[in-house]
Image (cartoon, rainbow, N blue to C red):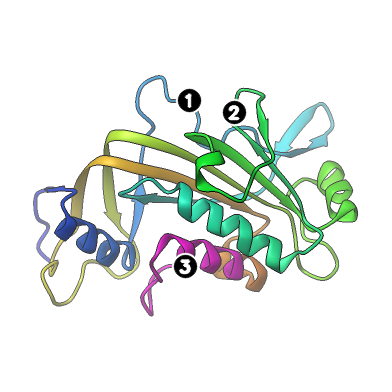
Amino acid sequence: MIALDPVLVTCTSAAKLLFHDLAAYFTVQFEPPLGGGAEAGTRSGTMTGECVEITGVDTPIVVPFDGRPAVAAFVNGMRRLWPSALVGLDDGEGSPTTDFDHPSGFPARGELTFARDDAMDEHWAEHGYAAMSDGAGPVALFYTIHRDLVVDVDVTGQGGLSDGPLSGWTDVELALPEATTLTLVTHAPPAEDVFCAAILALLRETLGYRRAVGGKG
């Protein structure tokens, strides 16, 4: 495969369609803007001697739009999955939010946590992101709305697209006037766990895309 120079794609309507084509084949890697802080926010851990072992597996996603309506839909999907769910939403500065019914109630930066019930919440506090006996585990979603974000897209798996307008692409730089970075945290890699795969599929569905057959994860 011939390696091409990075290609700059501006986020027009056509570029948004290209973005979702890319999302089917590539892993998007990003760095928050200067001063943006850590995307993953606060993470749960378990005590190991005098050290705290961070648990959970991150799945980062970037979409070229304000993702709060999708985040609201994801919350509703999790509440349908777990009718007795304990859901928390914090803006990262200690200001909890309890209005999950309208996207306007979501801050520009949010840390969402999901536990199926009190038992899972207690399990989470003691064991971090670890599956319970039935294979289900706690879930978190961290998101941030950005303006003028640039992300690098690196090839994973078998390489670039084999046909179509992106044939041969190996590096892509996306310039996004408006974007949302999201990090889904689950107890195991979605590619290796049925429950975690289902949660990632739900998030992708609310964001408006599905991974192509053969895509990573």
Residue to which mark 3 is pinned:
205
Q: Position of residue 121 (x, y in %)?
A: 84, 48
Labels 3, 1: front one: 3
Disc tally is 3
Looking at the rendered structure, the kind of residue marked 3 is Glu
Q: Are the two marked residues, 1 and 2, in contact with CB atoms closer than 8 angstroms?
A: yes
Marks 1 and 2, how far apart at CA: 10 Å
Instruction: Indicate left or right for 138 with 99 as reference.
Output: right
In terms of sequence position, does the residue under pointer 1 or pointer 2 come before the other? Answer: 1
Q: Which stretch appears magenta?
A: 197-217
Q: Quadrant of the N terminus?
A: bottom left
In terms of sequence position, does the residue under pointer 2 or pointer 3 come before the other? Answer: 2
The quarter holding residue 196 reads bottom right
- Label 1 crowd bin: few (<14), some (14–19), many (20+), radius 10 Å: few
Residue to which mark 1 is pinned:
37
Looking at the rendered structure, the kind of residue marked 2 is Gly
Residue 106 included in the magenta stretch of the image: no
Q: Are the two marked residues, 2 and 3, in contact with CB atoms closer than 8 angstroms?
A: no
Q: What is the secondary structure assignment of the residue under circle 3?
A: helix
Q: Position of residue 61 (x, y in %)?
A: 42, 52
Instruction: Indicate left or right for 22 with 9 as reference.
Output: right
Q: Position of residue 187 (x, y in %)?
A: 68, 56
Labels 1, 2: front one: 2
The quarter holding residue 106 reads top right
Which residue is pictured at 86% across the width and 50% down the height? 123
- Label 3 crowd bin: few (<14), some (14–19), many (20+), radius 10 Å: some
Marks 2 and 3, how far apart at CA: 25 Å
Examine the rendered structure and indicate whether residue 155 appears above or below residue 97: below
Q: Determine which of the numbered discs, if any, sits on residue 92 in the image.
A: 2
Q: What is the secondary structure assignment of the residue under circle 2?
A: loop
Looking at the rendered structure, the kind of residue marked 1 is Gly
